[in-house]
Amino acid sequence: MNEQDTPTHGSEVGPTGHGTAVRLDEGHIIGDGGIPERFSNPGLPVHVPRAADLDHDAARRAEKQVTTLFGISILGTLLFIVLYFLIDVEETIYVPGIGVTSASNLALGVTLALALLGIGFGAIHWAKTLMPDHEMVEERHPLRATDESRDRVVNEMREGGNSSQLTRRPFLKYTLGGALGLFAVPLVLQVAGSLGPMPQKSLSLTFWHGGPSGPGQEPEFRPLRLMRDPENTPVRADEVTVGSVYHILPEGLLDLEEGVLEEKAKAAVLLVRLQEDEIQSEKQLDWGYQGIVAYSKICTHVGCPVGLYEQVTHHLLCPCHQSTFDVTRDCEVIFGPAKRPLPQLKITVDDEGYLVSEQPFAEAVGPSYWERGQ
Amino acid sequence: MSTAPTRPADALRQGDRPAEARPGAAARTVGGVAGWVDDRTGAAKPVGYLMKKVFPDHWSFMLGEIAMYSMIVCLLTGAFLTFWFVPSAGHTIYDGSYVPLRGVSMSEAYASTLNISFDIKGGLIIRQIHHWSALMFIVALVVHMFRVFFTGAFRKPREINWAIGSVLALLAIIEGFAGYSLPDDLLSGTGIRAMQGFVQTAPVIGTYLVYAIFGGPFPGEMIIPRLYSAHILLIPALLVGLFTAHIGLVFLQKHTQYPGPGRTEKNVVGFPVMPVYAAKAGGFFFIVFGILALISAVVQINPIWAYGPYDPSAVTAGAQPDWYMGFADGALRLLPGWLEFEIFGYTVSMNIFPGALLLLPLVYVVLGVYPFLERWVTGDNREHHLLQRPRNSPVRTGIGMAAITAYSVLLFASGNDIMAIKLGMSINDLTWFFRIGFFVLPPLAFWVTKRICLSLQRRDRDTVLHGRETGTIVRTPDGRFFERHDTELTPDQWILVQHEPVAPLELEPAVDENGVARPAARKDRLRARLSRFYFADAVNPVTPEELAAAHYHGEEHEAIEPSETSASGGAAPIESAEAGRH
């Protein structure tokens, strides 16, 4: 019965024997005494009959339990049908521990669960109590085919190659190989070529450049008012109090017929007013207006909107991967996975006192990409 | 019948043979239909074979079943959802019954998901079952993978199935991502946005890839229908195909079994499909489905109405993906920003690219390759159908635990913001803890696991060598007392000694017997070193010799050839045997 042999790993290098196991001559010698090298498998244990195998009442009890479970399932199904028609989809219900929840969701889910679990537990209880529990032994056979079968396959292949003259006429082989290798190209080309347009300059442009900035569009710069999102109203510089934050979109973006989300994904800006003496960067002060500074809201990591502004520390935190930008230091990254500061939008005020852009973003906004620096 | 009073007419019936029971109507129909099918397919033979096929019983074998059933539930509920879901980013104004969002402009995908949740009777329960079963599918799949790994079930001849399983695991994750991106709510849209950021960082082709995937600038209107086609057609087709191959191989190769009395490499001990496994496995499907239905009834998942429609300039705090994407997200949170650099004016985002694009395939390639690596190291080319107890392969178990630890560090890192809030800790400290932990904890886990395995193995040896205490006190002629221990191995102790002894491979000597240098190939040296890593401090099972030697003490006769170790006295027979080893 001892299936396992001595350790024989590898062929070119041999085993060291029994590892560090105690050898006979290190302990007490009882002669070789015919002691086997390994223990032998004791064989299948004796079958222990279950209560239901021996006791008629126990079997009856098991039967009752199984039929009860199946009965519960039927009941669950019937309840599901009734409740489906009874409960309106808009009804809500308060359940302790869950809170206010959809009554129909709860009712249908629970009754469906009853219908399913009744069958499941019933069938398994049946299998465990009443079905035969004698373990069966099935022999395994080596998976590999016989040598003859293997040879036959090789010979058939060779024969096929010969009889089709593939071996005699090699050009058949080369051209067929070439044709098969190439036929996928048109299909791949169609998919790869037509999935989307070339990006062109669209990743480095935003609506702040003067208008729609999709592939192939090259807007001409004009100063754009900073508009509140979603009210779409311009912001006067004197309305912006110290410590306040505005979500800003360029003037005209929300009036677009199409492409609003695409432009928003690049043009969203956060407007913050700091005390001028808190600003540590000359350029930042210069590109702002009396301590009002505008920064791209699109994280330079992977593009989530940088949504969390801590007024006390002047830190901007991206909720996706926790990149932290310091607004007083030109939005430099002070923690987290982002590398580049948020790009600043140069702003000023127009004749009517509204904040306007003075120039578009000087660099591409949002996540990095290969040709970004070009 | 016998108790009925005798009537004159009864005499007439004497000698009658009872009428043979006619086959029941059902049996006749089944026989007819089955016969009809068999006439045309010859299916009786394989079906008969399958019905008698034996499967071994163990709770851990149900993990794969849970994955399989969850997948089936996913397919079923997913088919339902397609009846109402509109896979379009087309613009619409919501006017359904969820009041807070009435009049809000949104995509048709989001609006139709709201309709499924609020206006279609039973729609929410189907949607919730779909989501819960997807989560359950991947959890069960991962734990099933752990079981297969730690018991060495991936060894020959099952390497192919392990590789198929690895691909299945990867596909399941991608399928899940595509699925939870479909409703186009703010949270899932943020997930797509992050995915767009990842792809964009791919060196050289990043921007082209992004424009190809999104059909233009992000977000565009193509991504929802494309994800939909991937989610309901492409990936499920691959999943179902590979899964069929996976389960087919299990049938073909017969299931592995845990070692035990009567279980050998050459047999399968268990229960036949008909009736036991048909009932157990069939019933288990209903239990899995039922539990998923119950969870979906009482635990809300992904309340998309709370997030609002996707807007690329808005975000919710605590944005997190579904759990199975967590490790990649965690990796992104840990990679420091300074890893990004520019070279010749081109940007290389090593702070994003490795975690977002490389990690996922890398994990699954390493996983898929492991059986081949281990086979190369051990040189073990035999078929294995008996599973190993994890303790009996301490190094592999250690490697597995180290990998799980690394994975868990990344997974927990993806919740660093939530943890910071709940625990009142600094998110920066937590991030640093995870950054360091990613490098420190896995080796630690490896070491601890390996030591635990070795200790458990030693305890197994001790248990066997100790023998069974008989309660019989024996006095030796020289006045010593000892309790006789029964040296007979009980059947339940077979599990402690059944595994194979192992030893590291050794290089052949550097010179042959003639003193001629025999430079071992560098490959062999590496292999020998790896083999030592695996097996150098192996604890091998007690052999009959050792057991006999351990119990020689205190028998009626003194040792024939007393040796050094016997002087340690009869009081500690096991320790003396052990002392020679450690």
Image (spheres, grey):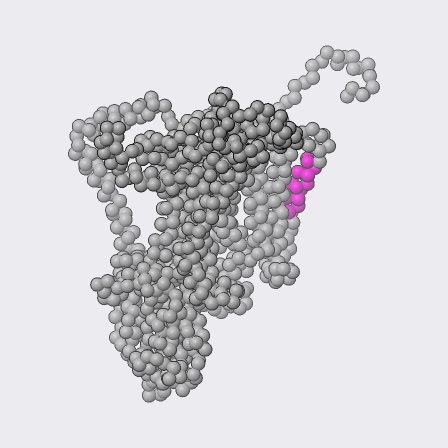
| Residue A93 horizontal/vertical position (percent) | 63, 61
Q: Is residue B328 visible?
A: no
Q: Which residues are magenta?
A: A62-77
Q: Position of residue B545 (x, y in %)?
A: 49, 27
Choose top left, top right, bottom left or bottom right for residue A281: bottom left
Residue at image point 27% right, 51% down: A190
Q: How many marks?
A: 0
Q: Is residue B2 above or below residue B501?
A: above
Residue at 71% across, 33% down: A58
Q: Position of residue B101 (x, y in %)?
A: 51, 67
Question: In the rendered image, which quarter contains the N terminus of chain B?
Answer: top right
Along the viewing direction, whichever of B181 and A86 lies nearer the viewer: B181
Q: Residue at x 28, y 58 (%)?
A: B203
Q: Give the residue displayed 38% in from the left and 82% down from the top.
A: A278
Q: Quick one: A290 or A237, which is closer to the camera? A: A290
Residue B103 visible at all: yes
Hey, which quadrant is residue B348 in on the image?
bottom left
Place of residue A74 in the rendered image (x, y in percent of width and height, measured from the top left): 64, 43
